[in-house]
Each structure stands twice: as structure tokens, then as C-alpha cells.
């Protein structure tokens, strides 16, 4: 027979990067003489930061066929007539093997002729 089916795959990825730095300087001076004292202090600081984000997504849509003309995968209207001819059929699925001559569908007179040939 023949079968056409679709396989879809999606993938996404994301990454982020951040960097930061902070600098600070501080100082103080204090002193005193007798009952008088004084102090001075100063501070200075700065910070830098940066961030970057990246993301991507991809999708793939692929058609596969079993039997028929595989060059027409994805074009079902063109592919269908190629499975009309049994010489273009392929095995879709294997199942349990059975002796065809033991089937009730096999004509009894044919079974007798076949048995004569086998002896």
C-alpha cells in the first residue's frame, strides 16, 4: 500500500549574559586637641553593568511517504495516483505471518492442486 505522513520538529534556544562592576573609595580624617575635635570624610562610588539576551527558534516541516512516488512527498494530490498501481506499493507494517493456504479465503480446489504439486 501507500502512506504519506508529516513530521514536524521545533527547536528553540535562549541565552543571556550579564556583567557588572562596582567601585567605591572612601576616606576619613579625624583629629582633636584638647576640648576641640574635627573630622572630615569623603566617599565616591561608581557602577557599570551590561546585559545581553539572545534567542532563536527553528521549525522543520518534512513529508515522508511509503510506497508511491517519493519525489512527490508533500504534494498529496499528485502522489495519490502513483499508489493506484500495485507495483508501486510498499510494506506499511509487518504483522504476524500466517500460512495463506490455511486461510478460509483460500479456495479448497486450489489447495488440493497445490498439495499435488508439493508431493
Image (cartoon, rainbow, N blue to C red):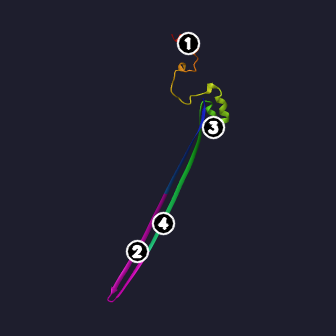
Q: In x, y percent, where is residue 116?
A: 54, 10
Sequence order check: which comes first, mark 3 or mark 1?
3
Is 16 above or below relative to 39?
A: above
Q: Residue furthest bottom?
A: 35
Is 57 above or below relative to 90?
A: below
Secondary structure of residue under mark 4 = strand
- Quadrant in which the N terminus is drawn: top right
Disc 4: which residue: 48
Disc 3: which residue: 74
Residue pictured at 37% horizontal, 80% vertical? 29
Secondary structure of residue under mark 2 = strand
Distance from disc 4 to disc 1, alpha carbons, whole Å, reads: 95 Å
Is 109 above or below relative to 35?
A: above
Give the magenta-colored segment's residue range.
17-43
Distance from disc 2 to disc 3, alpha carbons, whole Å, reads: 72 Å
Q: Nearer the viewer, mark 2 or mark 3?
A: 3
Disc 2: which residue: 26
Residue pictured at 38% horizontal, 82% vertical? 39
Q: Given contact means CB atoms under 8 Å apart, are the residues at marks 4 and 1 in contact?
A: no
Distance from disc 4 to disc 2, alpha carbons, whole Å, reads: 18 Å
Distance from disc 2 to disc 1, alpha carbons, whole Å, reads: 110 Å
Amino acid at each position: 500500500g501507500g502512506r504519506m505522513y508529516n513530521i514536524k520538529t521545533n527547536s528553540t534556544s535562549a541565552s543571556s549574559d550579564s556583567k557588572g562592576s562596582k567601585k567605591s573609595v572612601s576616606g576619613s580624617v579625624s583629629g582633636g586637641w584638647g576640648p576641640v575635635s574635627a573630622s572630615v570624610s569623603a566617599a565616591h562610588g561608581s557602577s557599570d553593568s551590561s546585559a545581553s539576551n539572545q534567542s532563536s527558534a527553528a521549525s522543520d516541516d518534512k513529508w515522508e511517504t511509503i510506497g508511491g512516488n517519493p519525489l512527490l512527498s508533500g504534494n498529496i494530490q499528485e502522489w495519490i495516483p502513483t499508489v493506484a498501481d500495485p507495483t508501486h506499493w510498499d510494506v506499511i507494517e509487518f504483522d504476524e505471518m500466517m500460512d495463506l493456504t490455511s486461510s478460509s479465503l483460500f479456495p479448497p480446489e486450489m489447495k488440493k492442486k497445490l498439495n499435488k504439486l508439493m508431493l
